[in-house]
Amino acid sequence: MSSDNTDIIVQNNAAEHRYEVRLGDQIAELTYRRDGDVITFLHTGVPAALEGRGIAGEMARTALDDARAQHLTVVPLCPFVAAYIRRHPAYLDLLTAAGRQRLQQR
């Protein structure tokens, strides 16, 4: 994986309910559902041509940082986001107590 993520620009495409990275004609996405003060991360998809660049991690970090800035509660249904939070426990406080317990039991 490249440690230089300067070419990765993550944008929140609120109309499509996804965070996305566009490189050339390829789009990587992290889809979500928003309900009031709760954001549920549903799926992370990175085209094969874009794999190995840290794009999924950048999307997860950006989405979680946005959730923190907006004081949202996070529900990580997406396995990638759940694993990212496990690897970066500073984001555990974005989950409910029950959500933290479920995440840590897996």
Image (cartoon, rainbow, N blue to C red):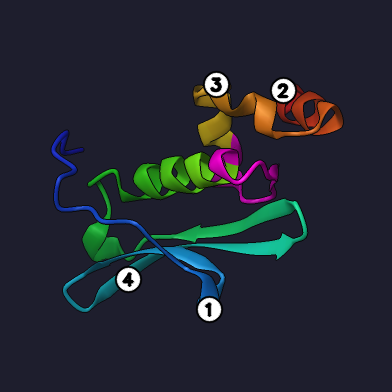
- Is 81 within the magenta? yes
- Is 85 within the magenta? no
Q: From the top left corner, tell me how far across and down residue 69 is, in percent.
A: 54, 41
Identity of the residue drawn at 67% across and 25% down: 93
Q: Residues within 10 Å of mark 2 (few under 14, many from 20)?
A: few
Where is mark 2, residue-wise? 104
- Which amino acid type is shown beneath numbered disc 4? Ile
Give the label on residue 90, or none.
Answer: 3
**Which callout, 4 or 3, points to the residue nearer the camera?**
3
Side of 17 where 71 appears, left or right: right
Residue sitting nearer the eye, 106 or 85: 85
What distance separates the C-alpha of mark 1 from that of mark 3? Answer: 29 Å
Ranked by sequence position, the earlier of labels 2 and 3 is 3
Q: Are marks 2 and 3 in contact (CB under 8 Å)?
A: no
Q: Is residue 43 above or below residue 84?
A: below
What distance separates the C-alpha of mark 4 from that of mark 1? Answer: 15 Å
Where is mark 4, residue-wise? 27
Q: Secondary structure at mark 1?
A: helix
Side of 4 where 12 appears, left or right: right
Q: From the top left corner, tell me how far across and down residue 20 is, in percent.
A: 39, 64
The stretch of residues the image draws in magenta is 68-82
Q: Are marks 2 and 1 in contact (CB under 8 Å)?
A: no
- Which amino acid type is shown beneath numbered disc 3? Ala
**Which callout, 4 or 1, points to the residue nearer the camera?**
1
Q: From the top left corner, tell me how far across and down residue 33 is, in percent.
A: 68, 64
Give the label on residue 82, or none.
Answer: none
Residue sitting nearer the eye, 62 or 51: 62
Q: Residues within 10 Å of mark 1 (few under 14, many from 20)?
A: few
Residue 42, image quadrant: bottom right
- Which amino acid type is shown beneath numbered disc 2? Gln
- Which amino acid type is shown beneath numbered disc 1? Ala
Q: Are marks 4 and 3 in contact (CB under 8 Å)?
A: no
